[in-house]
Image (cartoon, rainbow, N blue to C red):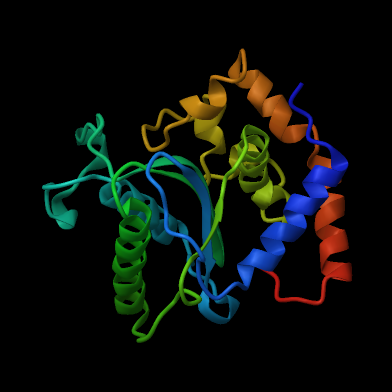
Amino acid sequence: MYTLGVDCYWNLRIKLDILIDMPSRLIPFVNDEIYHVFNRGVAKMRIYNNAYDYRRFLRTMFYYQILGPKPKFSRFLPNNFKLNNNKIVDIICYCLMPNHFHFLLKQVKESGITEFISKLSNSYTKYFNTKNQRVGPIFQGEFKSVHIETNEQLLHVSRYIHLNPIISYIAKDLKNFKWSSYTEYIGELDNALCSKEIILDQFKLKKDYKDFILDQLEYARTLESMKHKLLDAEQW
């Protein structure tokens, strides 16, 4: 029921690779629409060096999705803060890789995605540079985005994002990779960071979503290998 056709999968994969190097967005973000948003470290540098860096980025993600007044970041404790509907974006899913990140974001408030990514990137850059005694940007220019136009694309991109650690051979088992929303989706982690309903409501059980993610694992690995052999372009 949820299997994506080979041609559709491959065409979308190539589309993502091409858009990685686009200089800027051609259209503004629209409220209630969903976008795949991504960026990488400048010159492919690592942007997370250890578990503390990942946790800092996650905490910053939680903080900057919130609209309006909130405690100072230094005093902010996500577990003590109820989001309700007080957000500028809905984070549908995410994956933090050593030198890049992926989000599926739904814009809730005007300019919400731009504000969220800008504040997240600036805050994390200040933290990273202070910690590592460096100056300058850590992200590769302006972040990139792809508008999600169909439900099929929404499901595929969520799978693509969650499979990133496996197809890049960063992790052997997605359940053991702590820096994506996958464990939240399959019920292994009690976390209020993501708005999962738009995807999980299309599956009877969380196990069905897990099967949907994993049923094209080897095929996705094959495509990743083909991409590196066939495409003469910058890669993640």
Q: Is residue 182 left or right of residue 92?
A: right
Nearer to us in this view, 219 or 176: 219
Q: Position of residue 152 (x, y in %)?
A: 68, 34
**Residue, x 83% and y 37% (percent of image)?**
5
Q: Position of residue 83 (x, y in %)?
A: 25, 34
Q: Can you see residue 1?
A: yes
The answer to whether residue 65 is above or below residue 212 is below
**Residue, x 45% and y 56% (percent of image)?**
51
**Residue, x 38% and y 38% (percent of image)?**
193
Which of the image's four quarters has the N terminus?
top right
Q: Is residue 120 left or right of residue 17?
A: left
Nearer to us in this view, 185 or 16: 16
Q: Position of residue 21 (x, y in %)?
A: 62, 73
Q: Position of residue 184 (x, y in %)?
A: 49, 32
**Residue, x 52% and y 44% (percent of image)?**
178
Q: Can you see residue 179?
A: no
Instruction: Name the outermost residue toward the top.
Output: 204
Which of the image's four quarters has the C terminus?
bottom right
Instruction: Name the outermost residue toward the bottom.
Output: 135
